[in-house]
Image (cartoon, grey):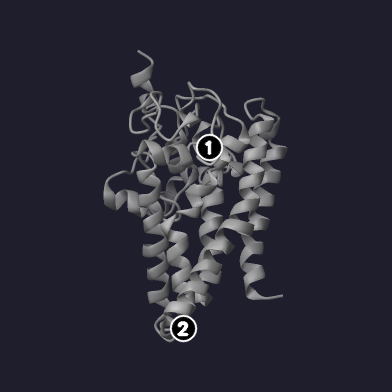
Amino acid sequence: MGDDFYSKLVPGIVLLVLGLLEAIGGLYLNDKRTRNDFTIELLSLVTLPTLIQPGIFFFVIFGMSTLFPDLQDYFADTSFWWHIVAFLILDDMTQYWWHRLSHVNRAMWKLHRPHHVVEEMGVLVTYRNAALYYAFMPGIWFSAMLVYMGMGYVYLFYLPIKLTVILLAHSETKWDRFLYKYKILSPLTWVIERTISTPSTHFAHHGLTAEDGVSHPNGNYGNLLFIWDVIFGTAKITRKYPTRFGAWNQLKEPWYVQLFFPILRSKDPNSELHSIITKNDFDPSKDFKDYTR
């Protein structure tokens, strides 16, 4: 079996192990997660790695081989470390800005909305996004270009590491509690929580309202690297976990509307997914408390 198979196998195993631990802990017996939620989560898990990402890679590599054949493997003999930097900037940093934009732009929010309307965390939340959110994500397109230009070997290691960190950041196993438990680990913890996404920092991003002093719905956007939040001023670190999750607009649309908007739209005229622009559009840049007074 090829290296590409193992690259995809590692995050798959991590997902299964974390999901099993969460199930043993009783997470999926909680009635906050509906059949509609499970459908969204399972379809997202399947479509991104089997259809969307491979489709983008095929389109980019075919197009570049046709239009720019001289660029194939152009960077193959350059430094391994430069390849890592290229992916961190063109994939992970651009994903930070893509994520951040989806919390500012109301139209983009509708593609990211499935990720936040669920009212509890867990590893299955990781890929809850509309199909077009990923189809237009710049980082995937840039990654395909880098692979075409000779950085494919590094990508085989970069991608599973990134996916593992993201899965762990969404997981109810809360692995970082171990770091906070022992004072002797404080220096190491200080570095880790400012470098990569952890459950504490990412759970804060999914928290319902900043009014609880822990949640940070309009910050902590980092995926693999949390340092982007530190650099660009959107970081909040409390070493605590919110008790309430979601977004103020909890209208639960059918799975096919949430995943395939705006191709498929809500029949409810009061829904923000009824059209690209509606009178009821949710402003993700405002906190929940603004709507409860």
40 to 32, vertically: above or below:
below
At label 1, the amino acid type is: Pro
Real-space CA distance between mark 1 and mark 2, rounded to the nearest whole angstrom: 38 Å
Tell me if label 1 and label 2 are in contact, CB under 8 Å. no
Question: Quadrant of the rendered structure where residue 14 is?
Answer: bottom right
Give the image location of residue 240, x and y in percent.
44, 35
Q: Which mark is residue 114?
A: 1
Q: Relative to the observer, which residue lies in front, 231 or 130?
A: 130
231 to 69, vertically: above or below:
above
Q: For the N terminus, which image quadrant?
A: bottom right
Q: Relative to the observer, which residue lies in front, 68 or 44?
A: 68
Residue 183: tell me if it is visible: yes
Q: Which mark is residue 94?
A: none
Could you classify mark 1 by the number of other residues whose Cα lies within 10 Å: few (under 14), some (14-19), or many (20 or more)? Answer: many
Residue at x-position 55% and y-position 71% = 156
Give the image location of residue 127, x and y in percent.
56, 47
For mark 1, give the secondary structure: helix
Q: According to the image, label 2 marks what residue?
A: 73
Could you classify mark 2 by the number of other residues whose Cα lies within 10 Å: few (under 14), some (14-19), or many (20 or more)? Answer: some
For mark 2, give the secondary structure: loop
Residue 239: tell me if it is visible: no
Please, which residue is most extreme toward the top here? 293
Q: Earlier in the sequence, mark 1 or mark 2?
A: 2
Give the image location of residue 283, x and y in percent.
36, 30
Q: For the C terminus, which image quadrant?
A: top left
At label 2, the amino acid type is: Asp
256 to 228, vertically: above or below:
above
Q: Relative to the observer, which residue lies in front, 130 or 22?
A: 130
Residue at x-position 59% and y-position 54% = 48
287 to 221, vertically: above or below:
above
Give the image location of residue 247, x and y in percent.
46, 29
Q: How many marks?
A: 2
